Amino acid sequence: MNAEARFGEAKAADDIVLPFQIAAHALRGRLVRLGPAVDAILNRHVYPEPVALLLGEALTLAAALAATLKYDGVFTLQTKGDGPVSMLVADVTTQGALRGYAQVDHVRLKAALDRPGPDIEHDPVPRLLGAGYLAFTVDQGTASDRYQGIVELNGATLADCIRHYFRQSEQLQATINLAVGRADADGGKRWRAGALIIQRLPEMRGGDADAEEEGWRDAAAKLASCTRAELLDPDLPPDRLLYRLFHKGGIRAYRQRKLADSCRCSRQRVARMLRGLPMAELEDLKVDSRLVVTCEFCNRGYGFDQREIAQLHAEPGPAARPS
């Protein structure tokens, strides 16, 4: 049995993050593979295809970037812009719970898609998101300060915006390869996504500067050579893909981390949110004597009748935290 077969003997896995190291160049990396999780999230709201692609990219980037950090809480990637897709939100918890949604003005979206020019896949950020910003937030609860990094939406794609963020950082060099699309899986066309990211961290430098630079450029070139088909192929095991790209540098894969489509909404969280609103505002929101709150992430509705609303305001409770 050859070395590649031994390295890639595990069967294909979906909804995982696989950490790895390129030993010869002292580089760290992450491979993200999304299958059922991204398919469920993107199909839940029946987004138009360009919006689904954009949200799929946000979900994959959130999973990839979160895996490069040490945190105990929630990592959020969020965009805000003046385009027809005014907001994208994707977040992932330390336990791997992944969710996301997009706010879309469908009238403006149609106008943007009808506008003459290259295919939308070449410049989705300026055409769909417009001018605005991309923010990364790490929320570890009340026991720790919230960290946030913000960068201007600068680039044709979300991956370009991430690369722009990396270039602005003096402490981190990183590059990323990203793909989202439909592929044959489970007897039909399913949404899939994949990403590769490698990092060159300051604490991992200190040897021969020329050799380190050559190693970084070589690894970045190999990452860029990974095709869309390879990133999305459900039959290509993740460790086999890593070996195919980086085996000459001494690739070492570590224990994979699972990801799952999982929303954190609950009736209790919604009740806490309603408790913080004035009764007059709640009355204005009622339809047929009933108030229904729908989660923007998972599309689940929580209904409250007049008696339940009155009871909420009669029972003091803690201020709601973001769900």
Image (cartoon, rainbow, N blue to C red):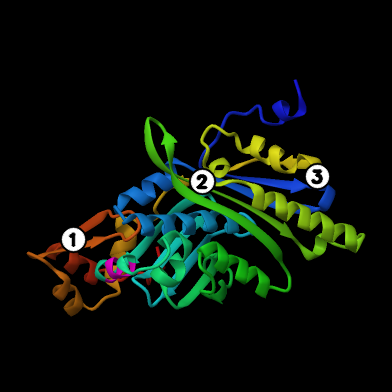
Is disc 1 placed on a helix, strand or loop? strand
Secondary structure beneath dot 3 equals helix
> Looking at the image, is mark 1 or mark 3 nearer the viewer?
3
- Badge number at residue 304: 1
Residue closer to the observer: 183 or 197 = 183
Q: Is residue 56 magenta?
A: no
- Neighbor class of circle 2 (other Cα within 10 Å; few <14, some 14-19, many 20+) is many
Q: Is residue 193 left or right of residue 267?
A: right
Task: Give the number of the mark in front: 3 or 2.
Answer: 3
Q: Which amino acid does label 2 sit on?
A: Leu
Task: Residue 254: tell me if it is visible.
Answer: no
Q: Where is residue 60 in the image (x, y as percent from the top left)?
A: 51, 54
Dominant SS of magenta comes to helix
Residue 313 screen position, x and y as percent: 23, 71
Amino acid type shown at disc 1: Phe
Magenta highlight range: 108-112
In the displayed structure image, the side of residue 72 where residue 20 appears, left or right: right
Up/down of 73 relative to 127, above or below = above
Residue at the spot of label 2? 259
Residue 314: x and y, percent?
22, 71
Pointer 2 and pointer 1: residues touching (CB < 8 Å)?
Answer: no
Residue 160 image offset from top left, x and y in percent: 57, 66
Q: Which quadrant does the C terminus fall into?
A: bottom left
Residue extending farthest right: 208
Q: What residue type is labelled 3?
A: Gly
Q: Nearer the viewer's eye, disc 2 or disc 1? A: 2
Answer yes or no: is residue 155 visible: yes
Q: Earlier in the sequence, mark 3 or mark 2?
A: 3
How far apart are labels 2 and 1 at the CA level? Answer: 32 Å
Query: Which of the two discs, 1 and 3, labels the residue nearer the N terminus?
Result: 3
Q: Mark 3 points at which residue?
A: 249
* Sequence-first tag of 2 and 1: 2
